[in-house]
Image (cartoon, helix red, strand yellow):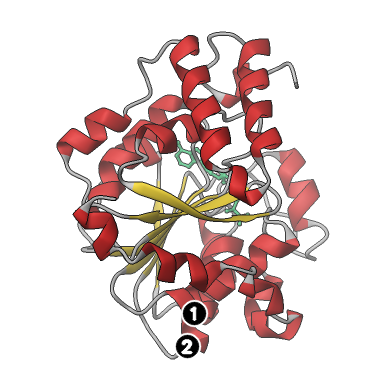
Amino acid sequence: MTDAEDAADLPAAARALAGAPWRAVAESDFGPAAAVPTMLSEEERRLYLWLAEHWATGAGALVDLGCFLGGSTALLAEGQRRAGRGAPVHGYDAFRISDWLKEKYLTPAGIAPFEGDWTLPLVEALLAPWRQTVRLHPGRLEKQSWEGGPIEILVMDASKTTFSMDRMAKIFFPALIPGRSLVVQQDYLHWKQPWIAVQMERMADWFTPLAHCPGDTVVFLCTRRIDRAALDHGHCGSLTDAEMLAHIEAAAQRLSRFGIEGRVRRLAEALRRNPGARNAPSMKTKP
Ligand SMILES: C[S@@+](CC[C@H](N)C(=O)[O-])C[C@H]1O[C@@H](n2cnc3c(N)ncnc32)[C@H](O)[C@@H]1O
């Protein structure tokens, strides 16, 4: 164990999330966040609220990369509101929606139809209960910057390509606080994004897995300050399939204590069936 990991007090961090304490969150705890549409699973909704309420301390901002209609952002904002804190909550997204997604998420939520694909005005209205803390950042994530100081919880739900994943790491990871900040990898186990496991494995000296939350989320603790050398080490864009497969196998072994090694190995099978793919739309053949 390195000095930094020692300082991170890994056993205490692991204990805090052991036994999935977020499962105790009641439906009534969601408050107005229950009305904001989300793609998250029931258990992930609880996790987000719980982390913002019980893990966060106000040491930094809460940042949501890929907030879609604002559901995940609302859960973070509501969680910390319940704890009586007011750290900034930043939501990043392209804020565009397809007709198919409108049908799937807006109609059941009783949201009136609107012309076009631009969702920012709708998301601003949905997040109005937390307008004191929430800041929205429209546009391509690859082109964003971060000047908001330390980040205590970083949610990643937009790693659809190795390029965007590497860019998000470069922009946001240096703001993580060693021993305190969590990275919530929402798509870690999603077969169409096997590179997320690769990145976290390449950065195993900087991130330790703390918990799995069904469906696809794995939560990591940042254990060391992330500098340029760390980012170069974590870079995935130029890896071969063989290198990626080796990292995925290492990840399967490292995450076996969560009982998800089979699901991690399925990521390797997904990559084998879609050789050379580095973006989710190219991952066409399901393992
Ligand atoms: C799976 S959805 C997020 C779901 C959301 N967290 C929720 O609670 O429902 C992924 C989101 O990431 C956004 N996204 C993906 N890649 C992006 C990029 N490169 N730049 C900006 N937004 C991106 C998409 O627009 C989409 O809304």
SS category of the residue bearing label 2: loop
Locate the C terminus and report the quarter of the image it occupies: top right
Which residue is at 22% across, 46% downward? Answer: 226
Residue at the spot 70% in from the left edge and 72% down from the top edge: 23
Say whether marks 1 and 2 touch (CB < 8 Å). yes
Q: Which residue appears farthest toward the front when viewing the image?
A: 1
Instruction: Give the amino acid at mark 1.
Output: His
Residue 201, position as x, y percentages in the image: 42, 35
Q: In which quarter of the image is residue 249?
A: top right
Q: Where is residue 131 in the image (x, y as percent from the top left)?
A: 44, 77
* Label placed on residue 54: 1
Which disc, if any, is residue 212?
none
Residue in front for this viewpoint, 41 or 86: 41
Amino acid type at circle 2 is Ala
Q: In which quarter of the image is ligand 1?
A: top right
- The residue under the point 41% across, 50% down is 208
Label 2 lies in ligand 1 vicinity (Cβ under 8 Å)? no
- Mark 1 residue element: helix
Q: Tell me: residue 150, above or below residue 214.
A: below
Name the residue at 69% across, 27% down: 266
Residue 16, placed above or below residue 38? below
Residue 236, image quadrant: top left
Is residue 201 shown above or below 226?
A: above
Q: Which of marks 1 and 2 is nearer the N terminus?
A: 1
Q: Dot 2 corresponds to which residue?
A: 83
Does the beta carbon of the residue at mark 1 sit less than 8 Å from ligand 1? no
Residue nearest the observer in this picture, 113 or 58? 58
Give the camera-side residue of 246 and 151. Answer: 246
Extreme-bottom residue of the structure: 84
Q: Which class describes the residues within 10 Å of circle 1: few (<14), some (14-19), or many (20+)?
A: some
Does residue 280 lie above or below 253 as drawn?
Answer: above
The image position of residue 273, as x and y in percent, is 68, 12
